Amino acid sequence: MPKETAVPLHAIISDSRDDILKEWIKAQLDDTSRSQAVPDASIKASSTEFFKLFERAISNGNISDIDRSEWEEVRHMLSDLSASRATQGSTPSETARFIFSMKQPLFARLTKDKSGPDAGAAVWELSLLLDKLGLYTTETFQKTRESIIKRQQKEMMEMSTPVIKVWDGLLAVPLIGTLDSARTQIVMETLLQKIIDTGSKLAILDITGVPTVDTQTAQHLMKTVSATRLMGAECIISGIRPQIAQTIVHLGIDINDIVTKASMADAIKEALARGGWTFEKQAENN
Amino acid sequence: MDRIPILKIGETLLVTIQVDFHDRVALALLEDLSEKIVNFSSKGLLIDISALEMVDSFMGRILGNIAKTSRLLDCHCVLVGMQPAIAITITELGITLSGIHTALTAEDGLALLNKLVNAKKNGKPSAKKQEAKWR
Amino acid sequence: MAVKSQEERPISSEEDILTVRNSVKRVTALLNFSLVNQTKIISAASELARNTLEHGKGGRSIIQLINDPDRVGIRIIFEDKGPGIADISQALEDGFTSGRGMGLGLGGAKRLMDDFQIESKENEGTTVTVTKWLEKN
């Protein structure tokens, strides 16, 4: 029964609170595998705070179910802690060790003050409790990491699709990195909206920075070209490297209606010529 | 609404599709247009779909048929004002609307029509080249 | 996944296709789908509703607002008791048509949505279920 062992457990902890806390903090600071992501002061502060909440939660007698309301403060503190550690760049095991390193000083007290079968049971229950708290910490840590990755992906996606106004009525999209369907979708939407906003009749899609083109990517590119055309604008694809050209031919994609140029410079030249612009280099004075 | 109004401006017919309509209205539009093109011997047809909210393959087929029919009746057809969302959806559906002329705005569309019609009047064989020119 | 709300619309005439489109439009706007996705969903619904009417000889559609822990979505079910589809994979191919569309109905609708399921038995009817999700931030 959890309650029977819980009461002495609480008593033991409050008796030697300061010693346990000191040993625990020392164990964390002495940990040789520790990275320098978390400063000593914050380890001390969070350990002290956690221990206070932990003691309060344990005094309620429930040490088996951390989902209950007595443990809410502890859970809350742990989520904050692992979230902040995740953003500080701690490793998952380092974060989990925050809890696990508490075992040693706690168990030492339990077995010193009591002996016999009771002590074994108490150690077992406490061990289960700390495992649960440790897992909870790791899980929150993982979730925070995931949300960071998601946010970064989104930011990268937005950053990697700039639509540039090159000239009056001429837009350019320099594509860099792998083109998957989600990204092409964003490219297409941003480009088409910009065409409407600026009244541009010509857009250059530059794929110099796209490492490989497979069937999917090629089809996405073609879709962008035809959607642009449906709106009444034209699309030039530039920066097609030799092996990509071969891939496109190999894939048997209909290339009859597509205007391509080897480089962005050629594409701009062609676009400006179509707009009726001519350029000449001025003779140098000296 | 049972009929979409068709406006005649000189040699050009102008249709603005402003509301979501059902299939019957679309079919009626195709009929009305062919009749008016012949009656007025119109040389150009401008269809503004800037207010269109969605397009499915039936709509796509109607638009394609309007373009083809008017072509047979010696009238150039230009589709103007397609919104990005519609263009993306059409492409995803797989409708190509090949052979149909498009322009960004009604103004661009009229300019393109003029060019197409004049090219023919001046006896230039290839209107295609003119159309490709970026204004 | 849980169904938060749903509405049923009959499909027995051309006007009903319009009604289905409007109901779908209302739900997609309510869920705050982007304009592009709203258009895709409405177009797919229109496509499938027309299938139900023409190929399935009429039926009904059920428009559901659904949610998961981390996302919300719209699910639309089209049911008919028509002749059914003998060869589903053929019906999904672009260019195959038994009606007056462009033969892009089923395949096109599949491309426009996130999830597409079709069940059909000859002489018993067809049920098409499509879903589009919206990730919560």
Image: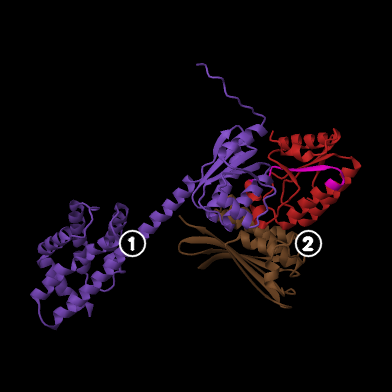
Chain colours: A purple, B red, C brown
Q: Nearer the viewer, residue C89 or B21?
A: C89
How packed is label 2: few (under 14 Cα within 10 Å), some, or many (20 or more)?
A: few
Q: Residue furthest top?
A: A286
* Image coordinates for residue A246, horizontal then vertical, percent: 60, 53
Name the residue carrying label 2. Answer: C100
Name the residue carrying label 1. Answer: A140
Residue at 66%, 66% in the rendered image: C61
- Give amino acid for label 2: Arg
Secondary structure of the residue carrying numbered label 1: helix
Question: Where is B114 relative to A57, above or below?
Answer: above
* Image coordinates for residue B4, horizontal then vertical, percent: 79, 47
| Residue B39 appears left or right of B28 | right
Question: Where is A203 relative to A251, above or below?
Answer: above
Question: Where is C119 relative to A188, above or below?
Answer: below
- Give amino acid for label 1: Thr
Residue A181 visible in image? yes
The disc placed on residue A110 is none
Tell how many labels. Answer: 2
Label 2 chain ID? C
Residue at 79%, 43% in the rendered image: B77
Residue at 66%, 60% in the rendered image: C108
Report if residue C98 lies within the magenta region: no
Label 1 chain ID? A
Q: Nearer the viewer, residue A228 or A196?
A: A228
Residue B3 visible in image? no
Question: Where is B25 relative to A63, above or below?
Answer: above
Secondary structure of the residue carrying numbered label 2: loop
